Amino acid sequence: MSGNSGAWGVAMWRDGYSEVDGPAQEQGISLEGGDPVLPYLPTDPVGTLLVPPLGLGVPAIRSGDVAFAQRDGVVQFADYYEPRQLTFSVLVKNDACPGCSSSPQVDAALVLDGITNGRARTPDSPGLTITGDLDVAIHLAMDDWTPAASTAPVSQWLTVGVDQRGWTTRVNTTGTMALFWSTDGTNAGVLSAASTIPLPALADGADRWLRYTLDVDNGAAGRNIAFYYSSDGVNWTQLGTTVTQAGVTTIHNSTADVIVGSYNNGGSERLAGRVFSVVLRNGIVGTIVASPVFDQPAGTGSFVDAQGNVWSVIAPAYLQPFVAEARSARQKVSRLTQEWSRNCSGATLVLFTDCHNPDASEEERVYNGPYLVHGRPRVADVVWERSNRGAARVTLRFDAADARLVLVDTIPGTFWTSEHVQTVDAVDQNLAPDPDLSSLSMTLNGATVDDAHVISGGPNDGPFFRRIILSPNTTSPMSMALSGTGTAAIPVDPGDVLSIAWWVRKDPGGGPAPRVDWTWYTAAGAVISSSNGAAQTATATWGRVTQENIIAPALAEFVQFRLVWSGTALTDQVLELGQVWINEGPTSTAPATVEIVGTLCAYPVFRLRPNLTAPIVVTYGNHQFTYTENIGPGQAVDVDTRWGRASDGFEDVTVNVEGDFFSPLAPGVHEFTVQTGNPADTGFVTLSWENAVVSG
């Protein structure tokens, strides 16, 4: 297929299965050259195509071939017979790192450390009102199934600042299960019950389902509490016997958050371990009112469950994405050899590409696969790299004598068109020491709050700072310093002109207004003067606001900027800040952006050019890495996310890179920034990628 520069993928299985629908996926073996294209790619990729398959070619439609015209007149299906040999150059790598052996599968989960107030939460809502029968199930894996202190897996229970006890579950130190509830929200109204026996022994870190039920009126002037456990969440075993107590009861309609991993907003009975899912029902086997599933993309800060509840993950808790079992390169090459070299009647290949050279001909745009090819596979050559352990280059051949080439019906995708190189000069860097506010805090001014640094969902889906007002502030403004004071503030020179931009969001309206304040300092750290910026507008959607043309006075050597909320906040109001950008100049600039166009991910290569002072922090989209050594005259370092490696042209310098330097950029617009240890640096960083099979 001349002219095609797309990302190729290959899947193979034994003959005897449906040509279009294919076999069960476990029968196949696959090679990736870009994003998977389902359902043709089995779930077990073993290598990456280095170049498109040699020998494929797509001839013109001939009379006698089968052809079907679509409504738009484009031919999407054809048969063609021609002897041919297809050759594949494949890179096989360890799933983890060079020299690593295999590693087990990791299931997606909410990860909790049991020490801090990290948790998952959703605010109270009318749909979460449960005053009668209660049914709570949770799938979790505790680090210790007989914990040193009692643990609350899931709760709606608040005792700090205001009495809003509703209900809370517990795993006791003895391994028994317990349920607490309050009839009036206070400690005086608290009732409880515990299982009559402990949970069966289970290895620490192993998973199981737990279920807590409360029947508030058993029909005999009493109430029943029962506890269950399960290995699959479907078949339940009752733990001990039902606990029956005298008196009909109710549950207080608490206004507290529903919390996974603790109660008291993360302050009490913290769980150490992993939580996979929760199901909360109004009534025993009743209506599901909440059902968070923590199998979410990496970096997710909030998500919506099937009932419309918005769940936020409060750091340092985080969502661990699913990680497939990791195989070593030797295991993968062994499987390739086994699958491609067997003496059998033949095999079927599925070949596909999901992007095109924008200059491809109309014929090439029609034949964009997937293809089905029948023939006999074999391994022609294996060349090991990286001390015989980390990677191998494998040559695969597919003898397709009198092969049948079938173009499978497919939906045309977006053609790849993109500028492939982007440059950011060091002088254009952001002067804010902590642009995403991840290490900063805000003054309370008498308020009771729930603060969180959320890792995604902000501007450009980046991180942001969230403050939920539990009780209003008594003084104003609530302030967040963007740097230290005095000589620990941001360096400037007299006469410098600065501008600052940041993002704000507020819900509901009313209450305080955002603005920026600043203070100038002398070289000795003495205060020269302070100023308040103009009041800005914040709404329920993210908006970027600016304060421009800020001129440093005489003797000024340092400046501290402070983001503030000026005025009295409202109870339950949410105040959010994100993405601070400070630059030299009378008008505010913005981060450079890079756009990935099409359907494929791009693995960028970064080149660091002199002069750059460490630490050199490069942010691309929601990924960030730090190069810890200076880049001096005559030096250049390439950081290649395709392999997660760095080189200075003479030797491997990966040891100098920290953070995420191995992730792709998905299609879309992403911010690209560079921040060095010296704002006066004159070097630059380039980002580039190829729309070829290795990088996608």
Image (cartoon, rainbow, N blue to C red):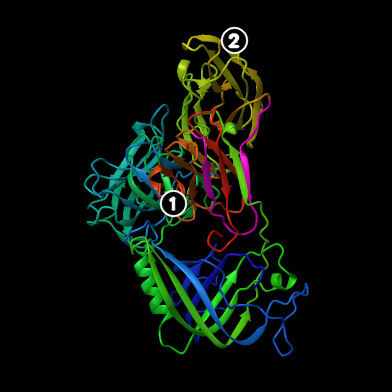
User: On the picture, is 555 further left or further right than 63?
Assistant: left
Residue 494 location, x and y as percent? 59, 14
Q: Quadrant of the C terminus?
A: bottom right
The one nearer the camera, 122 or 402, is: 402
Q: Is residue 650 visible?
A: yes
Specify few, some or many for label 1: CA neighbours under 10 Å numbering under 14, 14-19, or 20 or more: some
User: In this picture, which residue range is highlighted in magenta?
Assistant: 587-612
Which image quadrant for residue 170? top left
Task: Say which amino acid is labelled 1.
Answer: Arg
Name the residue beneath numbered marker 2.
554
Residue 80 location, x and y as percent? 65, 85
Is residue 680 positioned above or below 67 on the image? above
The one nearer the camera, 280 or 63, is: 63
Task: First in sequence, mark 1 or 2: give its number.
Answer: 2
Q: Secondary structure at mark 2?
A: loop
Residue 35 location, x and y as percent? 55, 62
